[in-house]
């Protein structure tokens, strides 16, 4: 079944999905960027629970409760190690692992940030293409997941993810 991909600009902690994803390091300490926003909105309990489940190999995910946030879970995708560097392979692995975890939890929707484009300094266009292709590749495996929302904080990321979705779905320029 097809997955509806949405691209929105805003704060991931306010996404209208069943679960949100934290772009994490493999030990799950939550500093700045998406992790910092989730920790500020949901409370330190999220970081404490996540750190007890780490470390994991970069590319893997864990999930925790959501603290004060309105979600049942937070998925933490280890898109980088302690060197705070990522790669196309890790971004793809973390995306697929996040989708797979949402599926295992029988969730119908998930919000993802642009993995590795903040602290990890990964090129945004490449990230968008990798993540969108990973979602499209996951469609044949899903029984529950129906909607994937890419939640981007700034206008540049928002526009580049919109373009990646158009490209993946075969849209052409007017």
Image: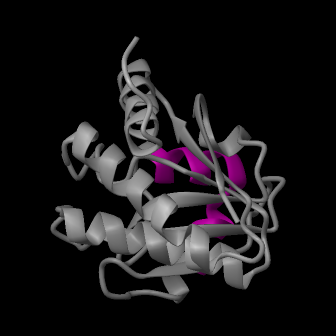
Q: Is residue 16 above or below residue 102?
A: above
Taking the image as shown, residue 162 lies to the left or right of residue 79, namely right
Q: Quadrant of residue 12?
A: top right
Taking the image as shown, residue 43 lies to the left or right of residue 139, namely right
Predominant secondary structure, magenta span:
helix
Q: Position of residue 48 (x, y in %)?
A: 58, 75
Q: How many marks?
A: 0
Image quadrant occupied by the N terminus: bottom right
Taking the image as shown, residue 36 lies to the left or right of residue 86, namely right
Asked whether 66 or 96 is in front, the reply is 96
Taking the image as shown, residue 42 lies to the left or right of residue 163, namely right
Residue furthest to the top in view is 174
- Which segment is the magenta one? 34-49
Q: Does residue 48 belong to the magenta stretch? A: yes
The residue positioned 52% from the left and 88% from the top of the image is: 53
Image quadrant occupied by the C terminus: top left
Q: Does residue 36 belong to the magenta stretch? A: yes
Q: Report whether residue 46 is seen.
A: yes
Q: Quadrant of residue 106?
A: bottom right
Q: Position of residue 98 (x, y in %)?
A: 53, 71
Q: Is residue 88 above or below residue 58?
A: above
Q: Position of residue 40 (x, y in %)?
A: 61, 46
The residue positioned 54% from the left and 81% from the top of the image is: 62
The residue positioned 48% from the left and 54% from the top of the image is: 35
């Amino acid at each position: 079944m097809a997955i509806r991909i949405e691209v929105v600009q805003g704060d991931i902690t306010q996404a209208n999905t069943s679960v949100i994803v934290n772009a994490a390091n493999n030990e799950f300490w939550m500093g700045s960027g998406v992790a910092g926003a989730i920790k500020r909105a949901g409370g330190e309990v999220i970081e404490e629970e996540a750190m007890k489940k780490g470390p994991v190999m970069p590319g893997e995910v864990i999930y925790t409760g959501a603290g004060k946030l309105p979600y049942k879970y937070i998925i933490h995708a280890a898109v980088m190690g302690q060197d705070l560097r990522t790669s196309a392979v890790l971004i793809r692995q973390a995306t697929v692992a996040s989708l797979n975890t949402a599926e295992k939890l029988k969730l119908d929707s998930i919000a993802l940030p642009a993995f590795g484009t903040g602290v990890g300094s990964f090129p945004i266009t490449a990230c968008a293409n990798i993540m969108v292709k990973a979602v499209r590749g996951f469609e044949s495996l899903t029984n529950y997941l129906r909607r994937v929302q890419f939640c981007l904080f700034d206008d540049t990321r928002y526009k580049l993810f919109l373009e990646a979705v158009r490209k993946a779905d075969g849209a052409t320029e007017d």
